[in-house]
Each structure stands twice: as C-alpha cells, then as structure tokens.
Amino acid sequence: MSSEPIERRVSYLGDRLRASQCQSCGKEYFEVRDYCSNCGRKSYGKMDSIDLFYDKGKLELCTFINEPTNKFMKFQNFVYGIISFHNGKIRVPGRITDQIIADGKDIDLASLEGREVVPRFRRRYSVGKSEVVPTISLAFTLADEYYPHQEYRITAPNKEYELPGVVGYGVYASRFRIKEAGLERAVPFVDEDSVTAAVEAGKLALIHSGVDNSLVGKVYVGSESNPYSVKPIASKVAQVLKLGEEDGDIQGVDAVDTEFACKAATSIFKDACALVSYPRSGIKYAMAIGADNSQAAPRGCPGGELDTFVGYGGAAFIFGKNDVIAQMEGWYSCTSDTPDFWRRDGEPFPMHGGRFTGDPAYFKHVRKATSKLMERLKLKASDIGYFVAHQPNPQFPVRIAKELGFKEEQYLPGIMINKFGNTYSGCVPLSLAAVLDVAKPEELILVGSYGSGAGSDAYLLRTTSQLIDKRKQQKANVRFQAENPFIEYVDYQTYRRLKIGM
Amino acid sequence: MQNRPTIVAVGRTKFGEHYGKEPEKLIEEAWLAASNECSLERKDLEACYMSDCFLPITNKLGLEEGFLSELTELHVPMEVTRSFSAALLTACHAIQAGVYNTVLVGGIEKMTDRWDKIRDDLMLLEDPWSYFAGGTPEANHELLLRAYIKKHHITGENLEKLNVALAQVSVKNHANATKNKYAQYHRPITVDQVLHARKTAHKPLGMYDFAPISDGASALILTSEVAAKKRCDKPIYVLACSSATDYLNYTARDDLAHFVAAELAMKKAVQMAGTTISDIQVIEVNDQSTMMELVSLEDLGFIEPGTSWKNIHESYQNNKNFYEVNGKHLFVNTDGGLKADGNPVGATGGAQIFEIYRQLKGQAEARQVSFVNGSPKTGCVSEFEGFGTKAYVTILGEKKD
C-alpha cells in the first residue's frame, strides 16, 4: 500500500512504478496486488506484474503548483497532474520535472494536457540531512523534449567473442547547462544527484545493449558525490533496474560502490571484464557506472577554483563476452600516494592542490599508464584511432595527448569537458561513450583515466562490427544530449542552487 | 427508520483561531451550550461519540476519550471517529439498536496549532501517492475542476461562466457568514476579489476558493424518540444517516470529475428517509473548495450533472441568496459553508448539523430561510473525509410517518 514509513524503507515500488494486471479480466492496478478486485479470490496468485518503468504515459490533467507542501519547497513552481498509462487503464499522480518556471508566469494547462511523458528516476522530496533520501519515479518529463522515450527490448545474443568487452553503454546528463567562458557544463535539476544519474545511465545502458537485466550479475558504481558516507549507490541501481535474478524484493546480484576520485569507475572496467571471463563466476554481464554531481566550493572560497569546471552526469558500461561492440585488448594501472585533491569525511567540498595537480599528479600518472600499455602492446600513437583522457580542465587532456603523439582528430572526439564539464567519475566513461558513438568497426581506442590520490588506468579497446548495429538502439547518445535543442541555460546563482539540490 | 434518533440540542464554538485555548476547552464550550439548551445533566449521558481528525498530530493528544472522561467526570463508553458525521452515524446506530437513550456527539479540531505543517499532514493522510508525487491539498480540487471541464466539454463563454460561477459560490458563502456570529469570517467579498486572487496566484483556483484552516468544536445531544419528548417541544429527527467510500488515491478512481461516494451515500439516505430529493429545502455541502460545492450539488442529485454552474450563474445574476433549479429554491450553506464559517475538520460536520437544526427549528435568526408554510421542513448535510474518500449524508426533518 502506501504507508509512509514502509514506503521510505522499501521504496522500490515508487522507484520502479510497478503495477499488476489480472490474468482473467485484464484489469490493471498501480501497485503490486495479490488479487483482482473484480474477480475476487479466484484471481489470487493469478496477477501478472507489469512495469511502467520503460513505458510512456500521457499527461491527462494538470494544474500548476506554486505553493508546494513543505517537503517540496525546493521545487518552487511546477506542473503537477494525473498521468495515464495503457489508454487510461492505469492512472498515477505525477510531477513534471526539469522545469524552471519563473514566478508570475501563466501556464497554459490545456496545452500541456494530452502530451506524452516519460518517467524519470528522481529524488522524491527534501528530508533532513541525517535521513534516508527518498526517491521516486512519479516524476516525468515531456517525451518530445530533452529525453526521448526509448523502448527496452531484450535481445538474445548471437555471437560470443574470445575477449570480453563493452556490450552496451548509456550516458545520462541533465537538461540544464551553465555557459561560461566558452565552456558548457551540465547542471543537475534540483531533484537529481549521483544516485539518480547512476540509475538513469544504467537504464540507458540496458536499453542500448538489449541485455537481459536478470543476467547482470554484478554492478559497480564509482562516484565521489554519493549523498551517503555509508550506503551504496549500487544497491539502489541493482534494485531499481532489477539486476540479477529477481526473487520477491531481493535481487541475485553483487553490488558495490568504489571510490578513487575520478577513476573510481574506470578502475573497475578490468574487474568487470575479468569477472565475466572467469569460467565459474556464473556471471554473464557486469555493469560499471561512473556518475557524479561534481562537487566544488563556491567561487572565492577555498577549493572554489574547481567551480569553473565541474559538471553533472554519468555513464554506464555493460561488459560481457556476447555481442561485444568493443573488445578489451589490454590494460595497465599505476598508483602512488599523491594528495593532489581530497575531501575529508563530513566536508561538503573537496580541496585542491593548486599547481601540484599537474606535473607531479595528472601528467605523471596518465603518461605512465598510457605509455606502458602502448609499450606492452607494441603500439605507436599512429596505430590508434582515438585517445580519451581524463579532463579536469580543457588544457590537460590536450597537453597529454600531444605529448603522447596524438593528433587532433584522435583526441578531440573524446573531449567532452566543453559540453558537460568535468563529471569526475563520469568523465572518462562519458567521453569514451562519445568516441564509441562515432567510431568505426576495427578501430583502436586508448583510454587514460586519472584519479587524484593518485592513479591512472589505461585501457585499449578494439571496436567490432556490432558497434554499428547497436547504434539504432540509442536515441539519447552523447551528441543528442550535447546538442539538444531543449537544453536550458541557467545563470550562476541558479546553477549553485540546483547543484546544492534538496 | 425504526426507533428514530432525535436531536434535542446543539452547540458550537466560534470557528477561527483559538490561540490560547486547549482542545478540551473548546469541546467544553460546545458541550455546555448543547446541554444547557436542553437542561441535560452529565449523569444523563450514557455514551459519548467524539470526532477529530488531527488531534494526535496537531496537539499530540492520543487518547481523546480520556480528557472527555475527565472533563465530564464520567466513565461511560466513549468512542472517537475522524469526522462528526461518522460519530453521528455510530451514535444513531446505537440509539436505533436500543442500546442507549441519551448520548453526546461532539467534534473538535485545532489545526492552527500546526499551521506550518498542516498542509503536509492533510495531503499525506488524504492521498499518500499524490503527496509523494508533489500534490497539494489544493491541487486535487484544481484537477477535479480540470476533469469536470473536460468531461462536460465546457469551453469558451461557458468556461468563463463556470469560472465566475465558482467565484459566486464563494461570494454567496461569505455573504451568508456575515449573519453567522460563529463564523470565522464576517467580511463580505466580491466576485472580482475572487477572480483577482486566482489571477495573482496564476492558478485555476485561488485563495478565496478554498476553506481556511480553523480551530473549533461542535456538539449535539442525540436521544431516542421517547427520551426526546422529555427534553424539548419540537425535536428534530435524523431521518437518515448513511455513508459510502471510495479509493484513497484520487487518480485511481474511474471518474475524476465527481465523487461517486457522495452520489451513493445520498441515494441510500433518500431511500432510508422515505423522502424525495425535492422535499429537501436546506442543504449544507462540504465546500472544501468552491468546486466541491458545485460538484456536490450534482452528486447529491439536486442539479443535473454538468449543469450546476449555469444555475449558480443565473441565480446570482438575479441577486438571489439561493440557487434556483427548475423553479425550486435551493438554500445552500446558509451559515457560510466551510469557506466562510470555517473548517475545523473534526468539528465541521457538527456545525453543518447545527445550521440545519436551527433552520428547521426556525432559530436561524438573520439567516432564517422561510417558505410559504414557514421554516423549512427537511434539510440535508453532506460531509467528506479525505478528498471524496468517505462521504456521509445525513437527512434531518420533522417526523413523517
């Protein structure tokens, strides 16, 4: 039902928008039901569970809220209404999200009614700092705006590869941007955080790969802006996306969060590959997500220099051995204890080592990992199609690319900081996705991630012909989100307000 | 109805903000007024039925029966329900069953003690999923209006008329409340004010379309027919008392443009009372919003579905304080309704019964409605719990056999 404390503890019902349908009369219900109220007890145990999570609804009726209840104050003004699915067989209440409506604006309700909407996974409302963060999918965006509706079609794999690799990926960025000094950076809406980005990116990766969610045996989430010090993002991803074998309200999946500044996600690409290759793991697919609401102190405060570059977003990669779009050919990782950027527990913003973040930190590690890998695989820069490096600012990736002998056409497709900002753990995954969006089959991609603290992972990927086949399964690719006509630009004050969130 | 329950006295407090008064002070005031009116002693009470919706939340009072027992120094059975109509319904059943002869029915609410959080409480309790999705108590009324407009294809000039009719409901209720000394507001308002409030809020309904939050209490003495004769000359009978329910989640209901529970409760009540809708002359509807008054008139069967705005609009043009429907005069919310009289949820139903009782007895002073043959003979009260989730209809009148 809808008991507030239970819904708070076990929020998978509202998170996933689960519904039920009677096998005999076909009546549908929002919420999970044991029997149909038309058919009575003979329908007990004969209810199919249906899912509205990948569905598209219609905004049937709506009104405008500018005096929300206390817990929704941070949303300020928004459109709220009744969303119907399956031609009105199921109706749910819903908030239209991703809209900044200025005070004193008249909303034409009639023109919104009848439009198609897509459920979004978001924070539900504000709670105290020590409380569990409630989430919900009763937040919707208009289907003909920033996020298109994409169907999730599970496809049986038809080819097994010798080496494991990327089977599919999804990239999630917000609709809002701040544009300053030639740089566009993604800004989360007030109900977004690293958890919601991780779930949405994972959802898009499932859609792109066509992988059966129940075959994903492990999920890793790398982030440095988890709203919790203790409680994984990965458990939310596993539950909402129903990864692994489903048994009631528990999923047969291993889920873990990783942290190593900006390389938290890239570090585990090799673990994911190893896991799916281990003959007795029983795991066909592993998902690795990097997502961040990149933190930075406001300008003028200590650590405020980061405020010029931070973004929001993430990317999810599914690794496996079937229907691979880019095989993992090798890797090299290196680590040293270099404190160039850090955030103490309990502190809201990270600190930055200023000029010590370049040569002794970023360049030293990225250079080491990438050149070692090239040396091992006996590759020259000219053998490689694309080079992707971590992007803490617009200059560093260019300098290291040039130093390693790469030309503009090799490194520019993988520079995304000017479109989304530095998305921390999401930065290299998102940029790799941008390269996979445009690469041709049988091309080599060299990746050099960087995590402060400090370390770097270099990977070499070789694309396959299935890269092209799977592209049609992804409408919201990186370019779609970078050049979307529905992007809304905000000023610095709004950016700070949205970034701090609820 | 066998062994008809009878109201022998009513009492209430003024509605509004009672900053310094404890909840038990309010119920004391209402109970004293009622008992005084029929010279009843505490020891004559055989049971008490009380209602409050929020006291455990607003005033952290969990066992309301306890302070009522302390107040009356009685140890009789006492029960608490969430609305006055629910308390009355339970009390009527007990009288009809012959269990008791004289009982107290009371209602109380003190919402202003939690004015800053009461909208969250209201919404969470009345429709949790809508609350989780961001809904406000007002939003559901606006969606009801949107659904009504769509269902009845109201457009253009008619839509203008509907919007004005809703404003007129509020204006009429405020005008009625100026003659009610217990009412929360004694300030007449104009149609322009109502429309202006909507405009500045940029919303379909504005401040003057909604009932306020209030403190207050109400009480009545209910007896068996036999016991009533000893207490007063002209008792008022409860001819019918019925209820019906609907889903908690408004969005899950089949028809979003009206309240099916009210319709069902009214049908049952009319049957129970052995009367017809056209016999009913004074009506108290639960106007949590102006939209709710409009739609209630249709749900209760007084006006054809989809047309009440026309009757309201035309009646108002002719400067009448009643709605004219097929030549018949409908007096609705003569006390000012929830809009202007106030809406202390648990006590609201008691104030509605209070008004009908006074009208039928010819004691409504400046508000008194009169027909060719004197004061009205039959009246009805409709009350809701939640947003149409529970509907109650009570029909009061002189005994008809």
Image (cartoon, coloured by chain):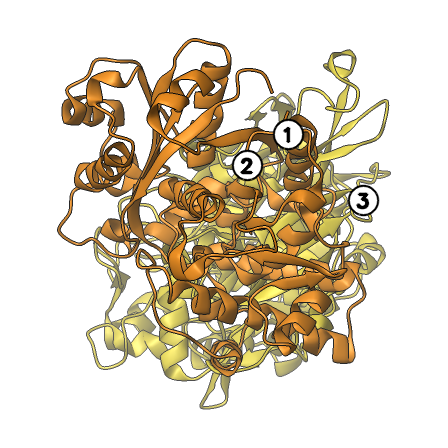
Amino acid type, callout 3: Arg
Chain represented in yellow:
A
Q: Give the letter of the chain under mark 3.
A: A
Q: Position of residue A424 (x, y in %)?
A: 43, 63
Labels 3, 2: one chain: no
Q: In the rendered structure, are the residues bearing label 1 and label 2 in contact, judged by CB atoms less than 8 Å apart?
A: yes
Q: Which residue is mark 3?
A: A153
Q: Position of residue B4 (x, y in %)?
A: 52, 21
Amino acid type, callout 2: Gly
* Closer to viewer: mark 1 or mark 2: 2
* Helix, strand or loop at mark 1: helix
The quadrant in which residue A12 appears is: top right
Q: What quarter of the picture does the N terminus of chain B occupy?
A: top right
* Helix, strand or loop at mark 2: strand
> Is residue A140 found left or right of A67 in the rendered image?
right
**Which of A277 and A114 lies nearest the eye of the viewer?**
A114
Question: Which mark is on residue B273?
Answer: 1
Q: Which residue is mark 2?
A: B397
Q: Give the letter of the chain under mark 1.
A: B
User: Which residue is found at the position 44% from the left and 55% from the top?
Assistant: B338
Local packing at callout 3 (Cα closer than 10 Å; few below 14, some 14-19, many 20+) is some
> Is residue B284 found left or right of A298 in the rendered image?
right
Labels 1, 3: one chain: no
Q: What quarter of the picture does the C terminus of chain B occupy?
A: top right
Is residue A66 among what the camera can see? no
Q: Marks 1 and 3, how far apart in space? A: 60 Å
* Closer to viewer: mark 1 or mark 3: 1
User: Which residue is found at the position 19% from the left and 17% from the top?
Assistant: B74
Q: Marks 3 and 2, how far apart in space? A: 65 Å
Local packing at callout 1 (Cα closer than 10 Å; few below 14, some 14-19, many 20+) is some
Is residue A155 among what the camera can see? yes
